[in-house]
Amino acid sequence: MQRDAWTFEGTTEVTCNIFTLHAMHTIVGIDPWHHPWLRGQWKNIRQYLKKPSYSAWKENPGVGLGVYAQLVHHFGWEPYKKVFREYERDENPPSDNQDKIDRWVVRFSKMVQQNLVPLFEFWSLPVTDSAKNEVSELPRFLPEDDITTMRQDAKGCTV
């Protein structure tokens, strides 16, 4: 199920695990937000958030899965399904890693009608000005949840 177009650097294992979380939720009934494996990563996430960087994020799939789990927690699985379908119809695949990140942020933002740039910047994922401009009219989204409250200055993230 994994596709290169929406698997950017650092997400090879993550975009595989998102399907595992979906299967566990659908078949076994374990809410992804409360999945024991993900909760077991929270110590690593807390440590990462002390000094977040994209290079560190790419090195730890357990940390990387955090943002994907947040998207499921706040928006459910339906946006994922719709975004994945959009990628299947895409006749012009992303040209490079940055394009993959930008397209993911823009597509998911438009799908949920929320500007997800603050969330991705919270995780220190690089988003270009062009992508930011494309979703700037949407309401900004940075939830107050179990993960964002791990970092005391989460509300102070600049976007």
Image (tube, grey):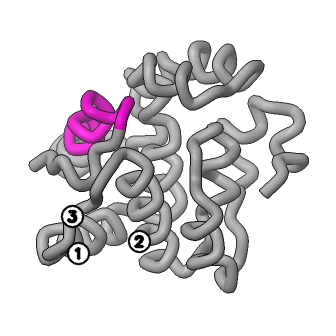
Mark 3 vs mark 2: give the one in front.
3
Which circle's residue, 3 or 1, is located before the other in the chain? 1
Residue 40: give x, y in percent of width and height. 48, 17
Between the C-alphas of marks 3 and 2, the distance is 13 Å
Q: Foreground residue, 28 or 85?
A: 85
The reply to whether callout 3 and callout 2 are in contact (CB within 8 Å) is: no
Amino acid type, residue under disc 1 in the picture: Glu
Q: Is 73 in the magenta?
A: no
At 68% from the left and 85% from the top, the residue drawn is 137
Q: Nearer the viewer, residue 48 or 19?
A: 48
Q: Earlier in the sequence, mark 2 or mark 1?
A: 1
For residue 86, which numbered disc appears in the image? Answer: 1
SS type, badge 3: loop
Provide the major secondary structure of the magenta segment.
helix
- Checking the image for residue 93, the label placed there is 3
Q: Is 147 on the left or on the right of 14, as rendered? A: right
Residue at the spot x=27%, y=28% of the render?
Answer: 13
Q: Do tag 3 and tag 1 residues touch (Cβ < 8 Å)?
A: no
- Residue type at the position of mark 3: Pro
Please give the range of residues in magenta.
9-21
> Residue under circle 2?
107
